[in-house]
Amino acid sequence: MDLAGRTALITGGGGGIGAGIAEAFVDKGMKVVITDINLDYACAEAERLGHGVLALQHDVTSLDSWAEVKRAALDAFGPVEVLCNNAGVAQAFKPLDQVAPDEFDRLMAINVRGVYNGVITFAPDMRERGHGHIVNTSSMNGLLAHGTFAAYSASKFAVAGLSEALRVELAPFGVGVSILYPGLTRSRMSEGQQPGLDAKTAEAIRSRMMQPVWLGRAVARAVETDQLHIITHPGHKAQVEARFQGILDAHGAPAEPGFVGGSIKID
Ligand SMILES: NC(=O)c1ccc[n+]([C@@H]2O[C@H](COP(=O)([O-])OP(=O)(O)OC[C@H]3O[C@@H](n4cnc5c(N)ncnc54)[C@H](O)[C@@H]3O)[C@@H](O)[C@H]2O)c1
């Protein structure tokens, strides 16, 4: 898809990766809507980027809020052609059995239900128009699970699985789907993730974080070329290979001796 002149809506665009995507899209000549639960964050990024970027208050967990931003984007720029479901929250590092039920539910509500809400708000129109693209932000934690980050990983594995299935569903209608799997990137979330660290260690970790605009440029390329997986931090390749190799290695003889069944292709 050629991006110039197209309309994009980016959730959680009031900083970090969402703002990096917005910046890359503006550079491509797109009309950009930044939404965020924190309107001040969204307005600050819109002002930084200029080029008529529209900032809207938005709670991705609420379908009413989705309906409002859809209407506002349509009034300002016309139909949204590129949707980036990027808003997300992390958790404090701790074992899963110490994550409170309401904390687990909140992660799922924003990171997973929020993406689903975006899809049901915009995918039917895109399918009808026979054109559009949806980018969902997962994480390297959606490919590699780490101890003390189980709830977050669960939400990001869910985003990846949902997105791969969605790509199959929407491809026949000319609508693309991409998954962004960021590694450590500068943002309020990542920089607020290590409370209690001394200043030197915090700065050392910060210096190893990628600048968000580079992720934005990778997203722009993926939309242009309809690429499914967006890997911005390839340094984790050996760990990803080891995980998939473990899964492949587990494919031995069937549990039921002589079993020949499998999945059935339904047309
Ligand atoms: N920064 C990283 O290292 C990193 C790595 C992997 C994945 N990610 C993912 O990237 C995405 C962006 O995160 P970021 O790192 O830029 O952090 P960030 O905190 O800068 O951005 C997330 C934004 O989402 C907004 N938000 C929170 N709840 C919301 C809601 N209910 N509705 C709408 N907006 C809401 C926040 O106000 C915030 O501005 C997230 O999905 C995150 O999980 C980040």
Image (tube, rainbow, N blue to C red):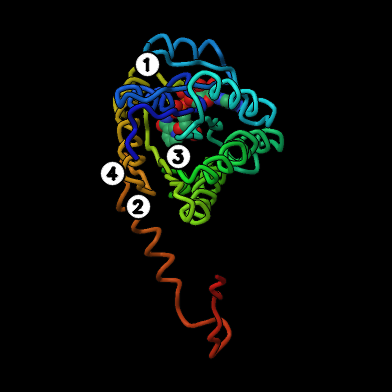
Q: In this view of the protein, can residue 192 be seen by the observer? A: no
Q: CA distance from mark 4 to mark 1?
A: 26 Å
Answer with mark 1 or mark 3, whichever residue precedes in sequence. Answer: 3
Amino acid type of the residue that numbered disc 4 sits on in the rendered structure? Gly
Q: In this view of the protein, can residue 10 be seen by the observer? A: yes
Of labels 4 and 3, the one closer to you: 3
Q: What x and y, as percent, mark residue 206?
A: 34, 24
Q: Quick check: 208 above or below 267?
A: above
Q: Secondary structure at mark 1?
A: helix
Q: What x and y, as percent, mark residue 57?
A: 59, 17
Residue 239's label in the rendered image is 2
Q: Which residue is mark 3?
A: 135
The foreground one among 43 and 237 is: 43
Q: Quadrant of residue 47?
A: top left
> What residue sits 48% from the left and 34% below the top?
83
Answer with mark 4 or mark 3, whichever residue precedes in sequence. Answer: 3
Amino acid type of the residue that numbered disc 3 sits on in the rendered structure? Val
The foreground one among 37 and 147 is: 37
Residue placed furthest toward the front = 129
Q: In this rendering, would 123 be left or right of 232?
A: right
Q: Which residue is mark 4?
A: 235
Q: Secondary structure at mark 3?
A: strand
Q: What x and y, as percent, mark residue 161?
A: 52, 52
Amino acid type of the residue that numbered disc 1 sits on in the rendered structure? Ala
